[in-house]
Image (cartoon, rainbow, N blue to C red):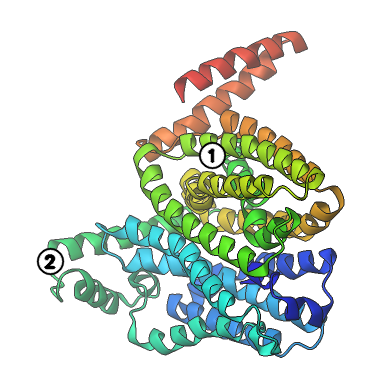
Amino acid sequence: MINNLNAVQPYFEHFSLDSDLIGLNVAIVSAGCIFGSPVVGPIVDRWGRKTGLGMGSVCIILGVVLQASAGKVAQLIAGRFIIGFATIINGSIAPMWVMELASPKYRSMLSSSVLVSVPFTSFLVTCIILGIYDKQSDWAWRGIMLAVPSILSLCLLPFVEESPRWLFYKGRGEEATNILARLHADGNIEHPMIVAETQEVLGALEHEKKNNGGWKDLVSPAPNLKRFSIAVLMNIFYQILGGNMILYFSSFLIAKLGIESRRTVILINIGLLLWKAFCSVGGVFLIDRIGARKPLIAGTSATVALFGMLSGLSYLSDERPNETGYAIGAVVVVGLFLLAVSTSWMILAYTYPPEVLRYSQRAKGVVVAQAIGYAFSFLNLYTAPLALEKIGWKYYAINGSWNFGILIVVYWLFVETKGRTLEEIDELFDGMLTYLISECLRQASVSKILTFLLEITIKTLQTI
């Protein structure tokens, strides 16, 4: 919605927006996510998943009210900050809650559906924007509709079940077992599947109590540092790769390419979002079939090439503004870019870090990695409109250059987890890294160290 409001003229005129304010208006949501990330864990552990979703929904409604009644930019920014704060709460709790309620047979599919539902929702919102973009009333752009999903959530929450895992955690085992039986076995608490699920949850909780690591476990010993580094880099790379920038600023980007009709810009956005939605569905099945590493490498490689093409088309569009073919070509490239990101980074940014982190690292590691990622997102989104205005096509070239650096890091550092047991994943980090460090330290000269690193790189790439 924020992206498409950039194509609504009364919205622009009311706040006298320039590139700087456009960037801040979008990036402030990420700032809210930074501050929201650390509170997710305490909320869900103390009050449960349902209460957490309720608190997040109330905060979103509060943010929408502030935004809808904003007369000045400061209040609009405050409302969007609160929306960002609440969005990370609900966005983190919802997949967790779905996984803990779902039957094991459908758990993966249902949890992935939470992620892929986002672009479909964005598509519907953009269709609404198409109906209001030319209305002169201020209420056409104030975004009061953003409160509707949260209001529906508050109305429906009393009629849904609490997470059985949280109930077991709180010592309410009988209630948890009854919920599992109602959802998975037609109320039969003695069904073998219910007995197995109960034992699995209780065993996991006991393991969690014994292996609940402190903050030091994130970076020590060395294998843990590598795991945590991958989780952090995954979140940073996803935020600066360009997918979010294109998604949030596609209206601004398309207009800079010379397509001036606001209706045309919104229609292009509708097409791109629908395309992205179906691509993300395909991405779920692709990743489930071939794993994480290949889509990450292929997706990142594609973004490097596509940013190069977008840079060239943007340059030609500036040089020959009367020729619309370059702008059309750029829109096609944007669609291909969304394909590359939707089938790799958009899904794996949320599913890959928990897989590579140790159990003792997972709760703290995911939160810290997300907070760091959103900090980079804030910087990237805040500066993007200004960069597009000041340096134009060169900005795409710069993005392509650092994406090439991301590709090198992913190729060297990221491991494949599909088809490997937890013990085999541990060996990838513990065995190989320990051997690498010890052998490097044993070498007597810089030349020998470099030679050894080259040899071990070749061996590593052959085994992964």
- Numbered label attached to residue 407: none
Q: Secondary structure at mark 2?
A: loop
Residue depicted at 44% across the width and 65% down the height:
117
Q: Residue 282 placed where, x, y %?
A: 39, 49
Residue nearer the viewer, 273 or 121:
273
In the image, residue 215 above or below residue 300: below
Residue nearer the viewer, 329 or 435:
329
Q: Secondary structure at mark 1?
A: helix
Q: Residue 441 placed where, x, y %?
A: 69, 19
Image quadrant assignment for residue 178:
bottom left
Query: Which residue position is annotated with label 1?
Result: 299
In the image, residue 297 above or below residue 345: above
Between discs 1 and 2, the one toward the N terminus: 2
Query: Which residue position is annotated with label 2?
Result: 191
Residue 205 at least partly seen: no
Q: CA distance from mark 1 to mark 2?
A: 44 Å
Q: Farthest front residue? A: 322
Image quadrant assignment for residue 89:
bottom right
- Label 1 or label 2, whichever lies nearer to me, is 1
Three-letter code for the amino acid on which mark 2 is drawn: His
